[in-house]
Image (cartoon, rainbow, N blue to C red):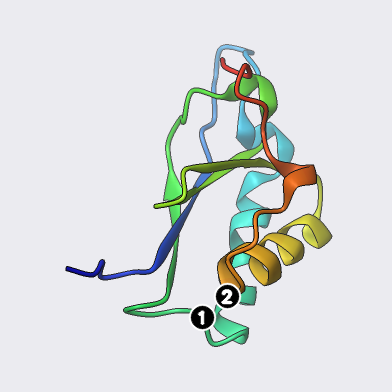
Amino acid sequence: MSSYFERHIFFCLNQRDNGESCCADHDAQAAFDHCKKQVKAAGLAGPGKVRVNKAGCLDRCAGGPVAVVYPDATWYTFVDRSDIDEIVESHLKNGQVVERLVLGEDVGR
């Protein structure tokens, strides 16, 4: 049985009002928007391909901003649009993890 989408990428867009660190403080919405645009432009969007999703807190705040690709369970941190471009091209299009952007296993909240 195959999955409806080959891969999902979830971007944490959580905003905290209590002053704690959160992905929204690192312009995660702009990264999400850019990824969605790049996936569509590359012809990767749609059933059997890639889905770009918003998420609430993914509980990896210390590494923020964060995104996770499933079913590969690969957690990423990123800085700018070029990082997102690399994730789209390398991982979402070609299935190759971008090692330099992988979030360490020990990074939590």
Q: Residue at x 59, y 74 (%)?
A: 93
Q: CA distance from mark 2 to mark 1?
A: 5 Å
Q: In the rendered image, which quarter is residue 49 located in?
A: bottom left
The amino acid type found where label 1 is placed reads Leu
Residue 85's disc number: none
Q: Look at mark 1 in the image and give the residue it sits on.
A: 44
**Element on which disc 2 rests:** helix
Residue that extends furthest to the left in the rendered view of this protein: 1
Question: Badges 2 and 1: C-beta atoms under 8 Å apart?
Answer: yes
Q: Residue at x 54, y 87 (%)?
A: 43
Q: Is residue 1 left or right of residue 8?
A: left
Q: Where does the image place residue 42, in percent across and percent down from the top left?
A: 61, 84
Q: Where does the image place residue 94, in percent across and percent down from the top left?
A: 61, 72
Q: Residue at x 38, y 68 (%)?
A: 6
Q: Where does the image place residue 20, in percent across and percent down from the top left?
A: 62, 13
Q: Is residue 102 left or right of residue 50?
A: right
Residue 78 visible (yes or no): no
N-terminal of the pair, mark 2 or mark 1, is: 2
Q: Crowdedness of circle 2 by 10 Å Cα count: few (<14), some, many (20+)?
A: many
Q: Residue at x 56, y 24 (%)?
A: 60
Q: Look at mark 2 in the image and give the residue it sits on.
A: 39
The amino acid type found where label 2 is placed reads Val
